[in-house]
Image: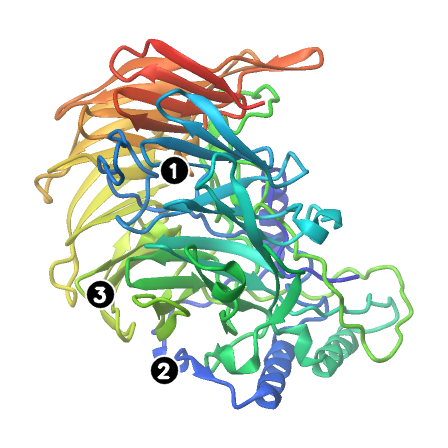
Amino acid sequence: MKTLIRTALTAAALATATAACSSSVTAPPAAAPLDLSDVKLVSYDGCDDMLSGLRENTAKSVTEWGLGGPQIMYMERADMASKAVPEATRDNAGAAEHSTTNVHEQGVDEPDLVKTDGKRVITVSNGKLRVIDAATRKVTGTLELAKEKWVAGDLLVSGDRALVLFNGGGIPFGAVAKRAFAPQGGPQYALVDLSAEQPKLLGTIEPNGMHVDARLVGSTVRLVVRSQPDIVFPQAREDVSSAERLKVNQDVVRRAPISAWLPKFTITGAAGPSREETVPCERVSHPENYTGTSLLTVHSIDLTQDLAASAANPISVAADGDTVYGTGTSLYVTSNPRWWFPVPVDPPVMDTPVEPAPSATASAPPASTSTSGTSSGSGLAPAEEPTSSDPSPAVPPTQPVAPTEPVTPTEPVAPTSSPVIPPEETEVHRFDISRPGAPKYVASGKVPGRLLNQYSMSEHEGNLRIATTLADQKTSSSAVYVLRADTLAKLGEVGGLGKDERIYSVRFIGPVGYVVTFRQVDPLYTLDLRDPAAPKVTGELKITGYSAYLHPAGDGRLIGLGQEASEKGRTLGTQVSLFDVSDPAAPRRLSQLFQKDSGSEAEWDPHAFLYWPKTGAAVIPVSSYRENQTDSGAMVLKISDTEVTKVGTITHPKIKEGDHSFQPGIQRSMVIGDSLWTLSQAGIKVNDLNTLDEQSWIPLS
């Protein structure tokens, strides 16, 4: 049986996994100062040196159960980026003023399921790409890219080129169309030409691994993929001791060839057959200390060029990666490479548990690695926020490396010893992406604790600010560290935030930082980061509930989206808060809007949040639960300088499946001219931005 390094953690399994860890896993020692000297990346001295290093380090990481521990589920990080205010855009002739994807950094686009340039709307759903004319509100072109309708896709668009990102499933292209992809298949990326009336597929790239994230700067996309060594371990025999099982697994690792680790990818061009490529040894780097259990690969694709030529020179690092943060010149990838186990967390619970009606809506996180915890749509605060957009819970199937000695299969043996939780720490790698082509490695560093998501990072004036929570099974506390961007050496830190709580959201705006921690009440901390060597807390606001997402709303104003809660920490439903942060020493809440027994996808995926500064309009998807019924729609708000008010709710027509029907959850919203566009699985509705009068319905069936 092939032991997987990562296993998806569903909400139902959270309590079981946490209880198991609480009773059998040794708590990590108290945090000690971290030595940054062992993190710098260096190149291998050829394939022999690489194979020797990978074998030895992987052998140190392997256990009697293989790679990843005794089948204890792994809880991954969220990918909820701290987003900047979308700007009104007129980027091409004749385009209407329009909103853009809610992204972390201006000029750095992030994958999403819909894009617009003001003249057209491009979206991908049910395996099909569609182009919609914004003026006529008609579908003008379609392209089927995946036969499996359940396959989730995202887009990055530059001019008349789109890169469609599938985390799993198949892209029918030439000979590839006949291939049967398993649900656990690796990521596939399709380059599409949008210049003609009908979109045209130009080529595909399929890495062996798991999609982590991607960023687009100019016309260049950086794709981050994580792969694990392709090694099969024998099933444990009952008459073999733990020490002997460990030795067998170490021997298997030490006999594995270099091909078990080297990342592979397949490129299919528009005019030629598919070809398989392998990242060469000279393009792989490593830290002095590493586990050997993961390799991180960055593919650079110029959307204006031929895919086969553009994607041929990726770089890899013998490291793990689960969170990506990008600026116009830097790409940061972070991970805790030795952390395989969930952190026991006391999540808030609802005052009155409500069973949501089953539906196929996208208004709540899917049960996959994208939602490592309970659905925020249920009203439950997630035990861990969702991870990056990768929905595949398993390592993609590839040719395994069999041990040289035959092993008689037997029934699996239960673990005989308890694993020791490694210390919580976050490893950070920075790459220079200021030039076209492959990124250039700059520096690496470590900080104690774990990131919430990419919101927890911000590069400003040559420094990286990073917020983490350090927890054991009894206590927790959060801190913000300031690192030099060129060396990632620590300049300063401010700690002691939220004792016995964890971070629920972070936002950095210039020299100021905002951190929300929560367990029973919600302290909103304001931080003065002007002196990177001496960051400090300047103010604190304690209110019930928490904000899972923070968004700037002009000078001295901050929007918070999350859950209201009782004084005992029981979540009650969606709340939107308007904060006055003009005085860093005395932050205060000016207004609160509360909707009972509800949750919003935007709590964990800020791409679902729309704020239009021109009119003060904000739109969030909301699902409410009552009497075993789910009501889904988009709540339209007006945010003034002092108040949050509800303007109305937009809903989409129900979808009928057999004898049942359900209301599709609205996933995204956009402004084009004076119209508000909302997207669901069923279609796109266009309403007047000011009156909310319906203007058009565009089915996507």
Q: Position of residue 508 (x, y in %)?
A: 23, 50
Residue at which label 2 appears: 37
Distance of mark 1 from mark 3, alpha carbons? Answer: 26 Å
Tag nearer the camera, 2 or 3: 3
The numbered disc on residue 444 is: none
In front of the other: 529 or 70: 529
In-image side of 277 versus 467 (left or right): right
- Colouring rule applied to residues: rainbow
Tag nearer the camera, 2 or 1: 1
Is residue 596 visible in the rendered structure shown here?
no
Question: Is 421 above or below relative to 282?
Answer: above
**Dot 1: what SS?**
helix
Identified by mark 3, the residue type is Asn
Residue at the (56%, 89%) spot, across then down: 46
Residue 684: which quarter of the image? top left
Q: Position of residue 397 (x, y in %)?
A: 72, 58
Identified by mark 1, the residue type is His
In front of the other: 374 or 124: 124
Residue at the (24%, 14%) spot, across then down: 690
Residue at which label 3 appears: 463
In front of the other: 339 or 97: 97
In front of the other: 427 or 160: 160
Is residue 435 visible in the rendered structure shown here?
yes
Residue at which label 1 appears: 607
Q: Earlier in the sequence, mark 2 or mark 3?
A: 2
Q: Dot 3, how many residues are within 10 Å of its Cα: few (below 14), some (14-19), or many (20+)?
A: some
Question: Is 521 above or below relative to 352?
Answer: below
**Dot 2: what SS?**
helix
Distance of mark 2 from mark 1, alpha carbons? Answer: 37 Å
